[in-house]
Image (spheres, rainbow, N blue to C red):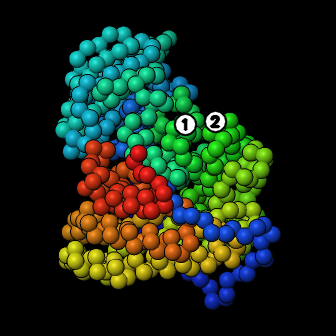
């Protein structure tokens, strides 16, 4: 998935017009040579929400890490109409033309849901910084104190002047009460407290995996980058977080990366990760899903290799083939597979597609798990059944009746069918994403009445009870790791994916959080330690 998800009907549980099963029976793969997968205890993992200036999770005490690319401005010109900026290799502005400046927004979170107070701003180099929607209390070379009132929304940091011989760089904007040494690793203490206890952390959105342009190791996000929202979080930072949480990291490698990138990424993980931790390895995200560029790429590569006549069929096979190539590189770096959980992707709404992927060239023999996204599906558009015009008029009682009678059983059906596929191929069944999936699609997202209904449903105690039964069905079907989607994120017409909406929300009042906590406790995990 991703943060902007207008077409989430395709994200693991919805229909896909070009992926319907042909009339022939599913391909029967040869018997796996490895030992049977056997039963695996279910556990709770989490997908961390993506990194952006509107992130309501605020994962770092230095909020500049979540800034956008610099916006070039010119006096008297329209917004963003300044000249192309000259940036150094880390993304810092080298020089400014007369009458121009560069700026970027920070904490663009409405409703006062981020800390107000005095922010400490540090920087290297010579120049002049300014702020909008914030008040500068004091300024000395390399340091500023800025008062921010979160009730006014976000604020902007501007570089008004920079010395080309010693340009402004290494800008840090610390939350009130924090500084360079206040939080080990730079992680917001609330992030660590909230997710300590999960068994895995899936970094798909932190890695900006969907539609990634990365190809070579030089393209990777680096700790020295001006921000981590543009290309994603550095591998060093993700491994550090996994170590501090005491959890297994789950990496979704960008679809275009070459073997050298994979090898070097794996080497960093091996060198830095706690040797007691396992590593979940996955090739990109939802390569079967045509809403993503990686799906088109897989189809093109599979077609070039003559893996299938149809681009989607060639894409499924390329997914399996490239996944196995990546697994082998990780096995070489780690000296075996004992610390690896090698994941082949499935399409929850279509077990035939999943079977095609794991069967191709005995891919299942080189993997440990089949990963699906068995959401509780409720994707409503003008032509869906029921349509937007009907659902918009429902009350919560009618909505939860529909979820209980139809949506939840449909999700359980996805799980049970894939449990059979996994068993046939001696694989564990894992959920790479999952949860409620109430969202308007194909224009349905623009119906305010239906959006209001969905938002109220996500805050209703019955949503927690629905999740209780959902997780129970997962366990009863033999499911293993379940990486819920997603951690903390604001709810809108694009979906209500966050377990919590805001970092300052009371978890005791969140039905979804309480359901996750109950599920975790039932698996011997103490969530939010």
Q: Depth check: give the residue in front, 16 or 196.
A: 196
Tell me whether the residue at label 2 lies in contact with that at label 1, contact meaning CB atoms closer than 8 angstroms.
yes
Within the image, what quadrant is residue 383 found in? bottom left
Instruction: Tell which residue pokes out farthest to the bottom in this image.
Output: 23
Q: Which residue is drawn at 48% across and 51% down?
A: 198
The C terminus lies in which quarter of the figure? top left
Q: Position of residue 324 (x, y in %)?
A: 73, 59
Q: Residues within 10 Å of mark 2 (few under 14, many from 20)?
A: few
Q: Which residue is farthest right?
A: 33
- Residue 88: x percent and y percent? 53, 25
Is 416 placed above or below 512 here? below
Q: Residues within 10 Å of mark 1 (few under 14, many from 20)?
A: some
Which mark is on residue 338?
none
Q: Is mark 2 on a helix, strand or loop?
A: helix
Viewer can see residue 493: no
The residue that appears at 72% across and 49% down in the rendered structure is 330
Identify the residue at image location x=29%, y=27%.
176
Quote the CA–CA distance across marks 2 and 1: 8 Å
Left or right: where 110 falls relative to 356: left
Question: What residue did someone put label 2 on?
Answer: 272
Residue 348 seen from this side? yes
Q: Residue at x 62, y 78 (%)?
A: 420
| Quadrant of the rendered image containing residue 234 | top right
Say which element carries label 1: helix
* First along the sequence among labels 2 and 1: 1
List x then y, in percent, for residue 244.
51, 38
**x, y percentage for residue 255?**
62, 53
336, above or below 80, in the image: below
Of residues 113 and 284, which is closer to you in this image?
A: 113
- In the rendered image, which residue does mark 1 sit on? 240
């Amino acid at each position: 998935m991703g943060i902007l998800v207008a077409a989430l009907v395709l994200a693991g549980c919805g229909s896909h017009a070009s992926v319907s099963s042909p009339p022939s029976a599913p391909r029967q793969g040869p018997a796996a040579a490895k030992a049977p997968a056997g039963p695996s205890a279910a556990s709770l993992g989490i997908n961390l929400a993506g990194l952006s200036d509107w992130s309501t999770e605020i994962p770092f005490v230095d909020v500049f890490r979540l800034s956008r690319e610099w916006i070039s401005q010119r006096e008297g010109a329209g917004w963003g109409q300044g000249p192309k900026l000259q940036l150094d290799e880390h993304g810092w502005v080298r020089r400014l033309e007369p009458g121009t400046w560069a700026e970027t927004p920070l904490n663009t979170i409405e409703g006062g849901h981020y800390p107000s107070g005095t922010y400490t701003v540090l920087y290297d180099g010579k120049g002049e910084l300014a702020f909008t929607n914030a008040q500068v209390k004091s300024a000395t070379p390399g340091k500023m104190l800025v008062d921010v009132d979160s009730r006014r929304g976000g604020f902007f940091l501007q570089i008004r002047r920079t010395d080309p011989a010693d340009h402004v760089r290494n800008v840090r904007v610390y939350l009130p009460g924090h500084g360079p040494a206040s939080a080990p690793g730079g992680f917001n203490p609330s992030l660590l407290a909230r997710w300590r206890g999960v068994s895995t952390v899936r970094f798909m959105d932190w890695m900006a995996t969907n539609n990634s342009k990365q190809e070579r190791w030089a393209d990777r996000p680096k700790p020295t980058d001006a921000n981590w929202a543009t290309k994603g979080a550095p591998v060093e930072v993700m491994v550090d977080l996994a170590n501090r949480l005491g959890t297994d990291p789950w990496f979704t490698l960008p679809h275009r990366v070459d073997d050298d990138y994979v090898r070097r990424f794996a080497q960093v993980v091996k060198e830095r990760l706690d040797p007691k931790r396992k590593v979940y390895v996955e090739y990109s995200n939802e390569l079967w899903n045509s809403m993503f560029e990686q799906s088109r790429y897989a189809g093109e590569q599979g077609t070039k290799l003559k893996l299938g006549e149809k681009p989607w069929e060639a894409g499924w096979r390329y997914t399996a083939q490239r996944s196995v190539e990546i697994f082998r590189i990780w096995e070489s770096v780690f000296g075996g597979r004992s610390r690896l959980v090698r994941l082949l992707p499935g399409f929850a709404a279509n077990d035939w597609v999943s079977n095609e992927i794991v069967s191709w060239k005995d891919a299942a023999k080189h993997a440990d798990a089949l990963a699906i996204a068995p959401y509780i599906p409720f994707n409503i558009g003008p032509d869906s059944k029921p349509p937007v015009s009907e659902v918009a008029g429902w009350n919560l009682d009618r909505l939860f009746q529909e979820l209980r009678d139809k949506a939840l059983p449909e999700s359980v059906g996805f799980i049970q069918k894939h449990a059979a596929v996994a068993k046939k191929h001696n694989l564990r069944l894992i959920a790479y994403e999952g949860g409620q999936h109430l969202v308007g699609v194909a224009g349905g997202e623009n119906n305010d009445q239906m959006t209001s209904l969905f938002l109220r449903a996500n805050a209703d105690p019955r949503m927690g009870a629905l999740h209780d039964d959902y997780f129970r069905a997962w366990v009863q079907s033999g499911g293993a790791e379940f990486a819920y989607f997603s951690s903390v994120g604001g709810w809108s017409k694009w979906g209500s994916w966050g377990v919590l909406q805001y970092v300052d929300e009371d978890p005791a009042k969140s039905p979804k959080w309480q359901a996750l906590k109950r599920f975790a406790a039932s698996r011997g995990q103490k969530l939010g330690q």
